[in-house]
Structure formats: structure tokens, C-alpha cells
């Protein structure tokens, strides 16, 4: 298997691609890269090694730590599985590097590695340089690493930004948190001292994730929908396997897409919290956020898929808020990193301060900025498409002047090809950066139009792969 870092890390099927040998090889490449960078504050680089709740993740993490130790770096293995954003926090707080053993939302058979630094995902320039060391990597192993718990540090960070204990008693009803058997299980209950209005589900460890992928998309959230209605909850919140992304079920048991969730967050952050500045989003998100930015007279930009690009904008103070279609969001005032629990707390704050349930908050957005019907369909292919530009060029070359009777306004080719129509409706075809998939996305003002756009995209994909 060719080892490559995609939109956020390297991933592979366990026992086939992701093995102890390949993990040691990647760890050695990271260690070799660090040897070329002088430590900023100490004689050694500190490398924090975290992990999720997947099968054997803690054992793979120990191997990473052993390799770091053998190469003269100060390796610290986390004492418990924590959300990936916790490791990002620690890299900022301790001026360290971070490696997280996780495959995020991928199916149970997968595992992977994410690299963190300066409070965020390592930039592409760093991961590319690490890849250059892979052919030279000759792994060595050290002794037992230092093991330390940092759960309190992470929970204290969350409490300092949005204190959940001050919010839950003011909620108009219970909230159901679905951790999807991932790393966030039990943390919100712990922060709120098991308050009766916080109901956690799928919070225990299950390396098989109940037989599904720990991805917070609608088809995986039927149990959460049912629980919200059963408990008469004010909302349901789902987090992915390593808890850096969020999905929302409203008080009526309806799934709200990221093209709805991000505008709701933006309206609150800009209108209530008073944030001002450039708004950015991944090219796979929708048109309502652009309309909101325009209403507040703020600059707006679409950038390639991958939170590392949003993180760079936030870290360099070029943006105040960023979002992506997979459910990752961040805003000025904290780390330049997506954090599912942080976003969950923001929604609790929105409900309390606006004194409205999520269905009412969405109704306000829809009335003011227009409806959104968004869907994503993935196509499995025999192998990953490496040259996204060539893929986009093939489709762009034969693009008609109209799609579904509406004229094409513009095309974006920063990441796959996004075709925007005169009425703001759009369709995107994008090869995945981490899996052998072609992802197709579409958004319009009604489900029927969205389905037509997706069917058109399917024909083009089948003709060009």
C-alpha cells in the first residue's frame, strides 16, 4: 500500500494496510522529520500520542510512542482515549507535537494516524515532508513510554469557553448526546455532573461501532432520532468516532444537514456574539452561509475540502469562522481546530440565550435566507483518484451551458469540480482524499431538484472514471 496523508491523516484497513509494521514505519518517518526541526523550548521534542476507541488503538499508540522514545524524543502516551481535539489542545498548551491513532468516521475495519501541531492539523507542507522520509524509514523501538492523563486539561478548556453546568439547568428540555461509541462517550455527563437533562447514548466502547461507521450522517442516526422523540428532547447531538465533528437532530426528530447547521451557527456568532471578519467554508458546503456573510457585509470564500485549510485561515487571522460539509466547525476565540463537543456546547448556548428550540432557529434562517435541500451520494471506485485536477478537467471539458433547465453561472475547480447555477443551486463531484470514493454533493431549494442534480452528477462520474 502507498502510504499517503489525505485531507486529515493516513488511513488503511487493519491487518492489510494498517499493521504494526506500517505504523512503525510512519512513526519513524515522523521521528526523522522532527530531527530536522530544532525544539523550540526544550532539549527534546515532546510528542503526545493519543488514540480513539477502535480495536487495538491503544496498542498501536504505544508502538508509536516507543518509536519516538527510541529516536530521542520525549514520548508521552495518553492514559485514556480522548477526542482528537484534546490532543490538538495539548500541542498548543505544551508546545508539543501530537500523533493520534484514529480513523475518524471510517468503518470499523479501518484505523489511521493524524498529526497535530500548534493546536491544529499539521499543514500539507509538513505531511508532504514526512511522506518524503517514508522510503528511508528504518524503525527502532524504545522502552515503555511515559503515560499521563490529560482528560482534566481538556474538560477545563471546554468549561473555560462555554460552561455547560451554567447552561443545562436553563434548557427547556433534555438533550440527547450520541457519541456513536466514540471517544467523547461520557464526557458531557462528567462536565455537567450527570445532570438529568443530559442523556447520553452509545457512550460505551464498542470497536465494531454497533455494526456501522461512526459517521454522523443521517442514515446512521435513526436511533438518535427515535430517542429524541421518545425523551421529548430539545435536540439530539451526534459526534463522530474521534469527536471532532457534529451532527444535529432538532426537537421534531429531523436531521439538519451541515448546509443548515453552519448557517445557524453563523447567524448566532455574527448576530449575537458579534464576530466580524472573513467567513470561509469548504467547497462542499452550501449557499446560505454566503448569503449570511453578504447580509453582514463580510467577506466570504470557499476553499478546498479538508479542515487543515480552514485551520490555516483561522491560525493566520485571515478568517473568524470556518465550516465543512462533514460537520467540522470552528470560530475565533479558541483553537484553529474543529471540536464536536465545543460545537455541542455552542448549540446549548444558542438554545438558552435565544430561547428557541433548534426547529425555531432553523425556521428563522429559512425565512430570512431561503430553504436548503442538501444530499451527498458516494460512489465506490477500484482505487483512489490521485489527480483531482485531471478528473475535474475531463468533466469541465464537456460541461453543458444549462443543467436541469438552469444556466451555469460558474465553476470552481479547487477540489474536484463544483458547478454553480444562476439560482445558486449547485452540484459538486469530488474524489475523496482518504478513500477510493467519488463523492457527489448537491443543494437546491427542494428535494426533487437536488435529486435531479445528483442523478446528473452520477451520469458524469460514470462516464469519466
Image (cartoon, rainbow, N blue to C red):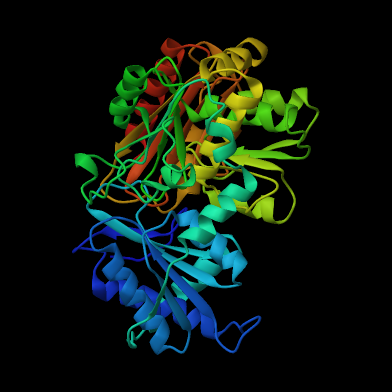
Identify whether 397 is placed above or below 106. Answer: above
Tell me if 156 is positioned left or right of 391 in this view: right
Q: How many marks?
A: 0
Identify whether 131 is placed above or below 102. Answer: below
What residue is rendered at 40% in x and 46% in y?
432
Q: Residue furthest right?
A: 297
What residue is rendered at 37% in x and 67% in y?
79
Tell me if 20 is positioned left or right of 194 in this view: left
Q: Is residue 465 visible?
A: yes
| Quarter containing the N terminus | bottom left
Image coordinates for residue 434, horizontal then vertical, percent: 38, 52
Tell me if 317 is positioned left or right of 395 in this view: right
Image coordinates for residue 62, horizontal then vertical, percent: 32, 74
Of residues 58 and 369, the one drawn nearer to the viewer in this rendering: 58
| Residue 78, picture quadrant | bottom left
Identify whether 342 is placed above or below 312. Answer: above
Image coordinates for residue 16, horizontal then vertical, percent: 19, 63
What residue is rendered at 39% in x and 43% in y?
240
Image coordinates for residue 388, horizontal then vertical, percent: 46, 48
Tell me if 24 is positioned left or right of 405 in this view: left
Identify whether 328 is placed above or below 110. Answer: above
| Residue 371, picture quadrant | top right
What residue is rendered at 42% in x and 82% in y?
68
| Quarter containing the C terminus | top left
Q: Is residue 122 visible?
A: no
Amino acid at each position: 500500500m502507498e502510504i499517503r496523508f489525505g485531507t486529515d491523516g493516513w488511513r488503511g484497513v487493519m491487518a492489510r494496510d494498517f499493521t504494526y509494521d506500517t505504523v512503525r514505519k510512519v512513526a519513524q518517518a515522523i521521528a526523522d522529520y522532527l530531527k530536522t526541526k530544532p525544539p523550540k523550548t526544550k532539549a527534546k521534542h515532546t510528542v503526545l500520542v493519543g488514540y480513539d476507541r477502535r480495536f487495538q488503538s491503544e496498542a498501536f499508540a504505544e508502538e508509536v510512542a516507543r518509536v519516538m522514545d527510541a529516536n530521542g524524543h520525549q514520548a508521552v502516551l495518553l492514559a485514556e482515549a480522548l477526542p482528537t481535539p484534546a490532543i490538538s489542545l495539548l500541542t498548543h498548551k505544551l508546545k508539543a507535537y501530537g500523533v493520534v491513532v484514529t480513523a475518524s468516521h471510517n468503518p470499523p475495519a479501518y484505523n489511521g494516524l493524524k498529526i497535530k501541531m500548534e493546536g491544529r492539523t499539521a499543514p500539507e507542507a509538513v505531511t508532504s515532508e514526512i511522506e518524503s522520509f517514508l522510503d528511508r524509514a528504518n524503525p527502532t523501538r524504545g522502552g515503555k513510554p511515559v503515560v499521563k492523563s490529560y482528560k482534566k486539561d481538556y474538560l477545563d478548556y471546554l468549561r473555560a469557553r462555554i460552561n455547560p453546568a451554567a447552561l443545562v439547568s436553563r434548557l427547556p428540555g433534555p438533550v440527547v448526546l450520541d457519541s456513536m461509541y466514540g471517544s467523547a462517550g461520557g464526557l458531557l455527563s462528567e462536565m455537567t455532573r450527570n445532570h438529568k437533562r443530559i442523556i447520553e447514548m452509545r457512550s460505551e466502547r464498542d470497536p465494531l461501532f454497533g455494526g456501522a461507521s461512526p459517521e454522523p450522517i443521517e442514515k446512521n442516526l435513526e436511533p438518535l432520532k427515535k430517542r429524541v422523540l421518545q425523551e421529548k428532547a430539545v435536540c439530539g447531538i451526534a459526534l463522530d468516532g474521534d469527536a471532532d465533528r457534529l451532527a444535529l437532530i432538532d426537537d421534531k426528530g429531523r436531521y439538519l444537514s451541515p448546509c443548515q447547521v453552519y448557517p445557524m451557527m453563523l447567524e448566532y456568532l455574527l448576530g449575537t456574539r458579534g464576530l466580524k471578519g472573513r467567513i470561509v467554508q469548504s467547497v462542499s458546503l452550501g449557499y446560505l452561509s454566503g448569503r449570511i456573510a453578504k447580509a453582514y457585509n463580510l467577506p466570504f470564500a470557499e476553499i478546498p475540502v479538508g479542515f487543515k485549510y480552514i485551520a490555516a485561515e483561522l491560525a493566520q487571522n485571515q478568517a473568524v469562522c470556518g465550516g465543512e460539509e462533514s460537520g467540522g466547525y470552528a470560530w475565533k476565540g479558541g483553537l484553529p481546530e474543529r471540536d464536536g463537543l465545543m460545537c455541542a456546547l455552542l448549540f446549548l448556548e444558542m438554545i438558552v440565550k435565544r430561547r428557541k428550540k433548534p426547529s425555531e432557529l432553523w425556521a428563522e434562517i429559512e425565512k430570512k435566507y431561503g430553504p436548503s435541500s442538501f444530499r451527498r451520494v458516494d460512489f465506490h471506485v477500484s482505487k483512489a483518484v490521485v489527480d483531482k485536477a485531471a478528473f475535474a478537467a475531463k468533466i469541465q471539458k464537456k460541461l453543458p451551458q444549462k443543467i436541469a433547465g438552469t444556466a451555469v453561472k460558474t465553476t470552481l475547480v479547487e477540489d474536484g469540480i463544483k458547478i454553480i447555477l444562476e439560482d445558486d443551486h449547485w452540484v459538486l463531484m469530488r474524489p475523496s482524499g482518504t478513500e477510493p470514493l467519488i463523492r457527489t454533493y448537491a443543494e437546491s431549494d427542494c428535494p426533487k431538484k437536488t435529486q435531479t442534480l445528483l442523478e446528473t452528477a452520477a451520469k458524469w462520474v460514470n462516464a469519466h472514471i
